[in-house]
Amino acid sequence: MNSIKLCFIVSIILCISGCGTNPYLPDLHSSAAKGNVAALRAKITKDNINSLSDMGWTPLMYAASKGKLESVKFLVESGADMNFISSGNSYYSKRTALNLAARKGSVPIINYLLEHGAEPNLKGATSPFETAATGEADMSTMNFLKDRGITLE
C-alpha cells in the first residue's frame, strides 16, 4: 500500500514539474501549432519564418503536424521552406512538413504542400508514406499518397 501511495505522489510531482510535457515552444511555433494565423501575421518576419524550436522544427512543421491548413497556407505564402529537414534528436529528426502532415493523415495539407512544390522524396528525410503508416493516417491517406507515386521506395 505504501508503494502505491509513493508512486501516486511521484506522478503528481512529475505532472506539476512539467516532466513529460512538450519542450518549450517559442510564440511563433506555438501560434502555428494552434492555427492562430492572426498571431502569425503579427509575428512573422523573413528572419524568423524558418526559425527552429528546441525539437529542431520550423513553424510550418508544427502547423502541418497539427493539421492547421490555414497556418500552413499562410506560412508557405510568406516564404516558409517546405522542404526543410529537421535534425533534432532521433525521434524528431528527418522530418519535413509534408511527412508530418502525412503522419497526421491531413490530406488537404498534403495536397496543398505537393501543389506548392514540396518534394516527397528528399534525400535524408523520412518518407511521407512511412510516417503516414506509423502515425494517425488512415487508408484513404495511404491511398492518396500511393496515387501520387509516394511509396516506401
Image (cartoon, rainbow, N blue to C red):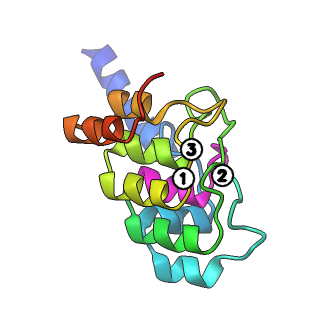
Along the viewing direction, whichever of 67 and 141 lies nearer the viewer: 141
- CB-based contact (under 8 Å), mark 1 and mark 2: no
Q: Which mark is residue 124?
A: none
- CB-based contact (under 8 Å), mark 3 and mark 1: yes
Residue 145 in view = yes
The residue at which mark 1 appears reads as: 61
Give the mark nearer the N terminus: 2 vs 3: 2
Amino acid under disc 3: Thr
Q: Which residues are magenta?
A: 53-66
Percent position of residue 106, x then y = 33, 51
Give the mark nearer the N terminus: 1 vs 2: 2
Q: Quadrant of residue 79?
A: bottom right
Determine whether 6 is above or below 132 in the image: above
Crowd tier of the residue under label 1, counting other residues whose Cα lies within 10 Å: few below 14, some 14–19, many 20 or above: many
Distance of mark 3 from mark 1, alpha carbons? Answer: 7 Å
Foreground label between 1 and 2 = 1
Distance of mark 2 from mark 3, alpha carbons? Answer: 14 Å
151 displayed left or right of 139: right
Q: Which mark is residue 53?
A: 2
